[in-house]
Image: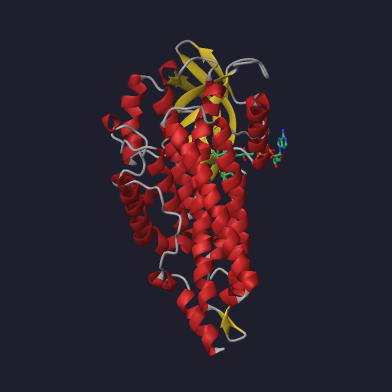
Amino acid sequence: MFASCQVIAKWLLPGFFNSWHKIDPMNFQQSELTQQVARTAADFAEQYIRPHVMEWDESQEFPLHIFKEMGKLGLMGVLVPEEYGGAGLGYFEYVAIIEEIAKVCGSIGLSLAAHNSLCTNHILTFGNEEQKRKYLPKLASGEYIGAWGLTEPNTGSDAGNMRCTANKSGDSWVLNGTKCWITHGRSGDLAVVIARTGEPRAKDNATAFIVERGVAGFAGGKKENKLGMRASETAEMIFDNCHIPDENRLGNVGDGFKQSLKILDGGRISIAALSMGIAKGAYEAAVKYSKERQQFDKPISSFQGIAFKLADMATEIIAAELLTLQAAERKNKGMSLSKEAAMAKYYASEVAVKVATDAVQVFGGYGYTKDFPVEKYYRDSKLCTIGEGTSEIQKIVIAREVLKS
Ligand SMILES: Cc1cc2nc3c(=O)[nH]c(=O)nc-3n(C[C@H](O)[C@H](O)[C@H](O)COP(=O)(O)OP(=O)(O)OC[C@H]3O[C@@H](n4cnc5c(N)ncnc54)[C@H](O)[C@@H]3O)c2cc1C
């Protein structure tokens, strides 16, 4: 009884994190720059995020101030070139940052990913010079929190069938409809919104627009009460005769859906990274606990049933990491990556769910409580197989590419 109480005392939140030691065999092939960036993100997460993880999770608080602080460190404009106020880094560094943050809190990792690789990256990739100069410095500094709206109540996987419309009226566009499940749907200062500008189901029938918070006819709607990722705000965005000037249109009329697919290719690398962070966090916690928890007068890690779980976790995490780095490398080199990004996202997200599930098993009953970290990894991990295209949709993308050859 006393021995198990001592183990518990070490692990109780937030105290056990003080004695946290990293068990991470996966940091190979990182350049000095990537390592430095990863250390910065990890230190920030330990100091400013770790102490509040469960408090934000319980209350579903979206901690806006944390994103402002991350802006000061360059984490809100990781991929944005320095000339637009960003950190000017590549996808290896971006993956490392999302992983380190998600290791500590999946919610903050998810929000950081949505801000960087969906909203900000859409403007960076498809915005004209004026739009980039106007918006990127604000997004990169954290002055603005970004949102990206594609999904609607009736169209998730089938996003091309959207009902939210934008009709031309003089020099502006009038948006009507609802977007749902939008990360920062209420708190975002600026959103990239994809709306239908052509006939339903027609080819090239969507266009992307930049919508700033405060414009008449645009409001945040219902905030979701979620299983996991609870400190990442997920909410509706409602458009009711919302007039957007034509100068806020991103690229050509009709290119919105094509643009979104390209943005999602990059976004899937970040969900793979998010998955890796969650999986590594759960794995490290499970290894540590298995060495400390005694049953039958031995650490539970000495039982093959537990040790084999850890072996599977380590192997699958490294396999997922290699897929993620492959996709990141292709993105850095400007190569096609639909298949590789879908493979990385699909495999890494399924690994995250499996590793987090097994980590709860390693912790036994204690893993089922909120006093220990693994139940949160377990809840958070599930989003990774759903957001930015479900596992089934990733398999459709992969199969399509495989069957091309
Ligand atoms: C926390 C969170 C944050 C999100 N953030 C954003 C955001 O910032 N912006 C945004 O635009 N969206 C966002 N989303 C939405 C997300 O991308 C969608 O939930 C996702 O694409 C799935 O759509 P759906 O929920 O409508 O499921 P559906 O499309 O209804 O799918 C239901 C089930 O059917 C399966 N299915 C559907 N079609 C097929 C098919 N052809 N073959 C086989 N199986 C199929 C799916 O795989 C799934 O299992 C977010 C979602 C969540 C949960």
| Vertical side of 268 occupied by 357: above or below | below
Q: Residue at x 34, y 41 (%)?
A: 142
Quick check: which quadrant has ligand 1?
A: top right
- Between 401 and 117, the residue placed more toward the observer is 401
Residue 270 image offset from top left, x and y in percent: 48, 42
> Can see residue 80?
yes
Left or right of residue 87: residue 306: right
Residue 19 image offset from top left, x and y in percent: 39, 72
Structure colour scheme: secondary structure
Left or right of residue 366: residue 111: left
Q: Residue at x 63, y 56 (%)?
A: 354
For the C terminus, the image quarter is top right
Q: Which residue is farthest top?
A: 170
Left or right of residue 74: residue 400: right
Residue 401 image offset from top left, x and y in percent: 63, 28
For the N terminus, the image quarter is bottom right
Residue 298 image offset from top left, x and y in percent: 57, 83
- Total residue callouts: 0
| Vertical side of 324 occupied by 212: above or below | above
> Can see residue 368?
no
Left or right of residue 300: residue 12: left
- Between 192 and 216, the residue placed more toward the observer is 192
* Rendered image quadrant of residue 95: top left
- Between 239 and 267, the residue placed more toward the observer is 267
Q: Residue at x 34, y 50 (%)?
A: 35
